[in-house]
């Protein structure tokens, strides 16, 4: 048993969970998704974003319904209770593969972005490796630390976003939205398609986070997640609106990282110019959150599937898989767009919506409910301490054997 | 390094390691330092004196004063004290004179024990008089500044407290200046310090516990807290940590700080040191615990979170609007001190497009003929500045002007004129230096000083992306560390909205109704009756 076994049993608050969801949703999608939607829905892309809002909540509802039946278990654990041990393990394995691929894609997103826009001469693998080092550190420290970091990034992100919005007002042109609904409702409805897979289907990471919410915060959870979804929709709409208003449809749909290019338009008295690299820094933060959560979910699900005492030993090995995988997952950025817009949605929706929904249905039909505790086993050391804390250090003899070798 | 998940973490005593350590410490104690533990005093005055002299190596500052008690011709008494550690006047007035003046009943009427009892009850007029019957206590009290009275034929001695001697008086604190507020700072004497705190909080709820830490130095260490406000878990944890310290000597609070803090490998301080009694009193009232160490004016406060390092006591004496402004100024200057050189390097080296054209041309013109790349310039100048800073702190104050002339004029001006370093870098480094002095807590400034170089390295290799990565690492680290179970970034993360009133802003006094959360779980209300600003009656 590892020295840090059970560290991931630490609890987070419902507010933190909501912020995590927000950062995850905007994580890598913020820079890429607006382009994808604009290509399909043209100047009505913001309507697609609006229509996608309720779907966000619908998906979160599935996970919440599952969490109501199995409040202290993750997907990897209750799938075994619902459809049997081995079928459950196979079921979880599909999610492990999904998360592994997702992690590689997210890592590739950030390294593509950095090499294309910020550091053109730096090789891809170097960006990948440096970024992964931070991810390993973060995931190693556990969900509590990731959640707190998320809170700080959230505040800074909102702050920078507000400044950007105000700075872009002068460039805004309402004519870019005309003609309104030129080809009827079909175009914005079609625009929802890429949003479904990226990021909505990926929300399945929540199934590993929900059991970690503090017991006393559970009632507020629904409210906070609702708020989070509203905020996600608002931010996506705002971003697309500004993207269209500032850049127009044609430029927006040609730029690979549209928001980044949009910020280049900021020009305040020739002093505040070309601040797009600040957006890049914030984006590094949000992508960090998304990738950290993906790798965390990946490791936790694998550890629970394999009945390990802790997820920690898996983090570094997974990183060694993710880095090369991200190098081969796309040939180039055009390929990435093609993949993200057409293929990924099918896979992501299948994993993130269809399978959990099916599981929920089976659980409802078979009437499965389980309130048992699914947390990783606590290390012996902690138990001893809890028992003998009142005695003034007299327990040290008993705990002497409980100092295990590090993970 | 990564901590454990439990609320109160860092119980380093568990496991076999501590057993080994304490066993070794005990052996150490038995062999060398405490040969007298439990050894009783002898009956013969002569032999006792001989033993003291032998054990203390005939040290000249130990004074033996023999005297013949009046009317008891054959009963000799011996007074032992350490010169300089006792107050000579009080020794004279309260011990020597009464013993000389008073009449003693004749020999045989009272046993030596009875005579000691009588001395204690009727003659010695000092505040503390205690019985000493073994050598361990004898030497302990002797070196605390007690005068010890021994009597022929008795195996107990009397210790009378005449602690005194020269010590520095109360002066204005040197490290935490304030325009408005009390002018007194702590001194090196622990009793003076505790009394200064008691004068601020005159409540029976202000409790004090004392330890003696340091196997050889035997330094008194006290903790003070307001009972009912301080978190009992933190208290228990602190007691355990203090008790587990085995060290030869404690010469300054830094020893204790390093030994009790949760984060051994963090550049960020998780224990705060303060020189101002008013700031300490304020912290006590918010439920924190104060550790006082004899021999230093710096007292420690736990738990210490990042936010506390930006609070100056003066914030609460000034109006809230200016206090809020100063708070934000401090946060901003901390960020500048941490990141300004690296941001400059990142912009100049990687993101020139961010600079307005006019400025870019100016910068380019300045850099004309400068032989080094920008990051090297920054490294050199930062390093030179650190050397200057250290020189100014260590040298005798008479040489101060020389250093400022040499440092400021010779280095600052002539490197630019000689074209070795561009003026922009000098400006950046100078601005960074000034910003680094804004932080009210010196210990946090040190963290910024060290991390600045790390950020410089990241910026010179990877530009803003590198800065972003290092900032992420720092954020993760800061989110992870705790001080006595308190998350270091509280109340930012985990966010407690109600506690935000004393962070980036300093809310008006009438709004700060509750004590900080998680510190005082039971007693939350700070003000029961709140005087709010009077509203104009509606017409």
Image (cartoon, coloured by chain):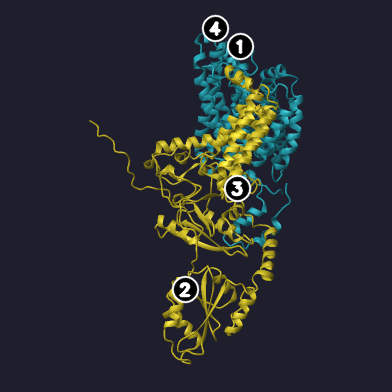
Chain colours: A cyan, B yellow
Residue A352, position as x, y percentages in the image: 64, 28
Q: Residues within 10 Å of mark 1 (few under 14, many from 20)?
A: some
User: From mark 2 to mark 1, how far is it between C-alphas?
Assistant: 93 Å
Q: Residue at x 54, y 59 (%)?
A: B295
Q: Residue at x 66, y 24 (%)?
A: B350
Q: Residue at x 61, y 45 (%)?
A: A372
Q: Nearer the viewer, residue B443 or A383?
A: B443
Q: Is residue B487 visible?
A: no
Q: Nearer the viewer, mark 4 or mark 1?
A: 1
Q: Chain of mark 1?
A: A
Q: Answer yes or no: do the residues labelled 2 and 3 have beta carbons within 8 Å?
A: no
Q: Quadrant of residue B226?
A: bottom left
Residue A338, position as x, y percentages in the image: 70, 17
Which residue is labeled 2 in the image? B91
Q: Chain of mark 2?
A: B
User: From mark 4 to mark 1, how far is it between C-alphas?
Assistant: 19 Å
Q: Nearer the viewer, mark 3 or mark 1?
A: 3
Residue B154, position as x, y percentages in the image: 54, 84
**Which disc number belongs to residue A182?**
4
* Left-right relation of B442 to B13: left
Element carrying mark 3: helix
Q: Are marks 3 and 4 on the same chain?
A: no
Which residue is labeled 1 in the image? A251
Q: Residues within 10 Å of mark 4 (few under 14, many from 20)?
A: few
Which residue is labeled 3 in the image? B394
Element carrying mark 2: helix
Residue B181, position as x, y percentages in the image: 41, 47
User: From mark 2 to mark 3, how far is it between C-alphas?
Assistant: 40 Å
């Amino acid at each position: 048993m590892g020295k840090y076994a059970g560290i991931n049993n630490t609890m987070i608050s419902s507010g933190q969970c909501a912020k995590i969801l927000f950062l995850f949703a905007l994580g890598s999608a913020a820079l890429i998704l607006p382009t994808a939607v604009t290509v399909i829905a043209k100047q009505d892309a913001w309507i697609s974003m609006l229509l996608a809002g309720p779907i966000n909540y619908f998906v979160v509802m599935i996970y919440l319904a599952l969490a109501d039946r199995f409040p202290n278990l993750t997907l990897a654990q209750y799938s075994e209770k619902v459809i049997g041990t081995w079928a459950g393990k196979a079921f979880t394995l599909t999610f492990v593969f999904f998360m592994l691929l997702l992690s590689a894609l997210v890592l590739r997103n950030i390294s593509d972005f950095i090499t294309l826009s910020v550091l053109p001469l730096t090789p891809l693998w170097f960006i990948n490796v440096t970024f992964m080092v931070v991810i390993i550190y973060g995931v190693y420290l556990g969900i509590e630390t990731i959640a707190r970091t998320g809170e700080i990034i959230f505040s800074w992100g909102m702050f920078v976003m507000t400044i950007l919005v105000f700075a872009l007002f002068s460039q805004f042109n309402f004519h870019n939205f005309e003609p309104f609904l030129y080809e009827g409702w079909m175009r914005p409805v079609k625009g929802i398609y890429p949003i479904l897979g990226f990021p909505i289907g990926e929300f399945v990471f929540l199934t590993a986070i929900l059991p970690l919410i503090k017991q006393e915060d559970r009632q507020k959870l629904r409210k906070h997640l609702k708020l989070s979804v509203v905020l996600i929709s608002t931010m996506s709409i705002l971003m697309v609106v500004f993207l269209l208003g500032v850049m127009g449809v044609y430029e927006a749909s040609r730029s690979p990282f549209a928001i980044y290019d949009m910020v280049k338009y900021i020009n305040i008295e020739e002093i505040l110019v070309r601040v797009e690299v600040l957006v890049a820094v914030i984006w590094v933060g949000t992508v960090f959150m998304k990738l950290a959560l993906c790798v965390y979910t990946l490791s936790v699900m694998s550890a629970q599937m394999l009945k390990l005492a802790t997820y920690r030993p898996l983090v570094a090995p997974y990183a060694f898989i993710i880095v090369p995988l991200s190098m081969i997952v796309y040939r180039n950025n055009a390929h990435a767009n093609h993949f993200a817009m057409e293929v990924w949605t099918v896979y992501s929706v299948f994993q993130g919506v269809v399978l959990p929904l099916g599981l929920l249905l089976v659980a409802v039909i078979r009437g499965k409910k389980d309130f048992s505790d699914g947390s990783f086993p606590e290390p012996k050391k902690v138990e001893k301490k809890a028992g003998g804390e009142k005695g003034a250090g007299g327990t040290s003899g008993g705990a002497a054997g409980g100092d295990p070798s590090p993970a | 390094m990564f901590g454990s998940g439990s609320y109160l973490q860092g119980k380093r005593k568990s496991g076999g390691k501590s057993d080994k350590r304490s066993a070794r410490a005990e052996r150490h104690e038995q062999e060398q330092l405490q040969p007298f533990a439990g050894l009783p005093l002898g009956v013969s005055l002569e032999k006792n004196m001989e033993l003291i002299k032998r054990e203390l190596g005939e040290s000249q500052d130990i004074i033996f004063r023999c005297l013949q008690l009046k009317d008891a011709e054959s009963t000799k008494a011996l007074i032992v004290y350490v010169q300089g550690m006792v107050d000579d006047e009080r020794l004279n007035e309260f011990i020597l004179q009464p013993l000389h003046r008073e009449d003693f009943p004749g020999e045989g009427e009272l046993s030596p024990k009875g005579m000691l009892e009588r001395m204690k009850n009727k003659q010695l007029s000092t505040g503390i008089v205690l019985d000493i019957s073994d050598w361990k206590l004898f030497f302990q009290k002797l070196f605390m500044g007690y005068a010890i009275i021994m009597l022929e034929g008795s195996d107990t001695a009397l210790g009378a407290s005449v602690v005194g001697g020269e010590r520095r008086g109360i002066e204005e604190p040197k490290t935490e200046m304030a325009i408005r507020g009390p002018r007194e700072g702590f001194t090196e004497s622990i009793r003076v310090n505790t009394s200064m705190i008691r004068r601020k909080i005159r409540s029976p709820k202000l409790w004090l516990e004392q330890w003696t830490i340091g196997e050889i130095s035997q330094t008194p260490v006290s903790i003070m807290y307001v009972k009912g406000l301080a978190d009992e878990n933190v208290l228990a944890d602190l007691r355990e940590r203090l008790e587990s310290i085995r060290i030869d000597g404690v010469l300054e609070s830094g020893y204790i700080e390093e030994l009790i803090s949760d984060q051994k490998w963090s550049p960020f301080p998780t224990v705060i040191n303060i020189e101002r009694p008013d700031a300490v009193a304020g912290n006590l009232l918010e439920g924190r615990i104060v550790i006082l160490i004899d021999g230093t004016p710096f007292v420690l406060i736990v738990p210490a979170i990042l936010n506390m390092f930006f609070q100056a006591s003066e914030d609460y004496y000034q109006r809230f609007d200016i206090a809020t402004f100063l708070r934000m100024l401090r946060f901003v200057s901390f960020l500048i001190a941490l990141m300004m050189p690296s941001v400059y390097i990142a912009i100049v080296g990687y993101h020139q497009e961010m600079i307005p054209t006019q400025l870019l041309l100016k910068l380019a013109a300045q850099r004309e003929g400068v032989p080094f790349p920008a990051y090297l310039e920054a490294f050199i100048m930062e390093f030179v500045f650190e050397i200057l800073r250290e020189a100014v702190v260590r040298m005798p104050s008479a040489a101060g002007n020389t250093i400022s002339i040499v440092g400021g004029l010779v280095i600052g001006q002539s490197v630019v004129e000689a074209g070795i370093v561009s003026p922009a870098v000098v400006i950046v480094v100078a601005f960074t230096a000034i910003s680094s002095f804004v932080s009210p807590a010196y210990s946090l400034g040190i963290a910024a000083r060290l991390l600045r170089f790390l950020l410089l390295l990241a910026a010179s290799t990877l530009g803003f992306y590198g800065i972003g990565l290092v900032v992420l690492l720092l954020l993760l680290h800061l989110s992870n560390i705790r001080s006595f179970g308190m998350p270091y970034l509280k109340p930012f993360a985990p966010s407690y909205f109600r506690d935000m009133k004393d962070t980036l802003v300093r809310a008006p006094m009438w709004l700060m109704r509750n004590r900080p959360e998680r510190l005082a779980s039971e007693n939350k209300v700070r003000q029961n009756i709140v005087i709010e600003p009077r509203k104009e009656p509606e017409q």
